Amino acid sequence: MASTELGHQEKAVLDAIASNPFVGQQEIANALGLARSTVAAHIVSLIQKGHILGRGYVLPEAKRVVCVGGAVLDRKYSADKPIVPHTSNPVSGCRSFGGVARNVAENLARLGVGVSMVSSVGEDEAGRAIVDQLRGLAVDVSAVTALRGERTAEYVAVLGPDSDLVVGLADMDICDLITVADIDRAWPQLASAAWVFIDCNLPAEVIRAIVARRQGGRFRLAVNGVSTPKAMRLPEDLTGVDILFVNLDEANALLGADHPTARLAAPALVERGAGAVIITQGSAGAVVADADGVVEVPSTPARPVDVTGAGDALIAGTLYRLIAGEALAEALRAGSVLAALTVESRFTVLPELSPRLLDAAADRVPELT
């Protein structure tokens, strides 16, 4: 893997650019007593290592997150009475935007974090609406590709009277069209990020490429398994994954085992190379495992209205606090609170979400066990 450490000449070139982002290569060469070709080579290296963002020598934003994965049109239908199979059921419906990576991106943007999105949508009304909504939240959508002739991903959720999911239907074929070449084009953004978050809606080769190249950038990598079949797209060796978010079924599928509890499964995934593992258990809370051991974080009590988006909120809240410098278990407590706020809303992402709102709910943070 490429090292992110800077040589003496690279650091001198970076200092020159930092002091004057509009400086030319020849000016740098003259000031440092180097050949222009040498300066050009160092600039290419600085781009690959994420210290500058390419043409124009734009310096990276501190604490930026890049979200890579699904951007989806969600349709949700809620039933007042238990769903009866094989017949028509009265429901009330609404349309919103979803996709794990997109939801995490929106949550973070509403919390004031700089966010970029890497995904594919169809060249259709749904795709344009998704991109416009993210752009309106100041999310960088320059790496979201609109594919002619393809459908934007769609997810249909049917919820029972208890607000739990009865059935989910996902048309996610367009996510399989995200390629390693798309990652290469967006690499300066990834390499310069504080965190990169990916979901396993991505093709296996794209996931492998990002995990393998994680050490070639300065970012830390968080991954969500999405579902049991999609979690299997992860490489067997999880080295390079700083935080893995999965549920117990996904964890056991990855391990090829049948651990009865998250406390047993999470450390086994750490042994597979992950820096830390968070196994979510819905209302039963979550388990965090890393090299220091295992901690349980209870769920935050809530009165559920709609559980859609709760897991994505938990991820975003956790990353938000990690960026602020909190330890992982403490950060997850904030993620648990944001998940509770989300399930108490009919929205997949709280439209009123802000740092102040999350801080105001701090007294709901559960104690660690």
Image (cartoon, rainbow, N blue to C red):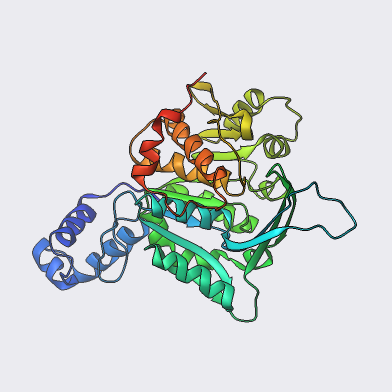
Q: Is residue 209 above or below residue 130?
A: above
Which residue is at a point 47% across and 21% down the rendered structure image?
A: 367
Q: Quadrant of residue 356?
A: top left
Q: Is residue 63 left or right of residue 308?
A: left
In this view, which residue lies farthest toward the bottom?
Answer: 148
Which residue is at a point 54% across and 75% down the rendered structure image?
A: 146
Q: Position of residue 184 (x, y in %)?
A: 47, 65
Q: Position of residue 105 (x, y in %)?
A: 46, 55
- Report whether residue 122 is seen: no
Which residue is at a point 53% across and 64% down the rendered structure image?
A: 119
Q: Is residue 362 above or below residue 356?
A: above
| Front-lying residue, 326 or 5 | 326
Q: Is residue 228 left or right of residue 53?
A: right
In this view, which residue lies farthest toward the right?
Answer: 86
| Front-lying residue, 195 or 29 | 195
How many tags in the picture?
Answer: 0
Q: Position of residue 284 (x, y in %)?
A: 63, 28
Q: Is residue 342 left or right of residue 57?
A: right
Q: Is residue 86 above or below residue 224?
A: below
Which residue is at a point 43% across and 34% down the rendered structure image?
A: 331
Q: Is residue 88 above or below residue 258?
A: below
- Report whether residue 335 is seen: yes
Q: Quadrant of residue 311?
A: top right
| Front-lying residue, 262 or 190 | 262
In this view, which residue lies farthest toward the left?
Answer: 31
Q: Position of residue 248 (x, y in %)?
A: 68, 34
Q: Is residue 160 left or right of residue 196?
A: right
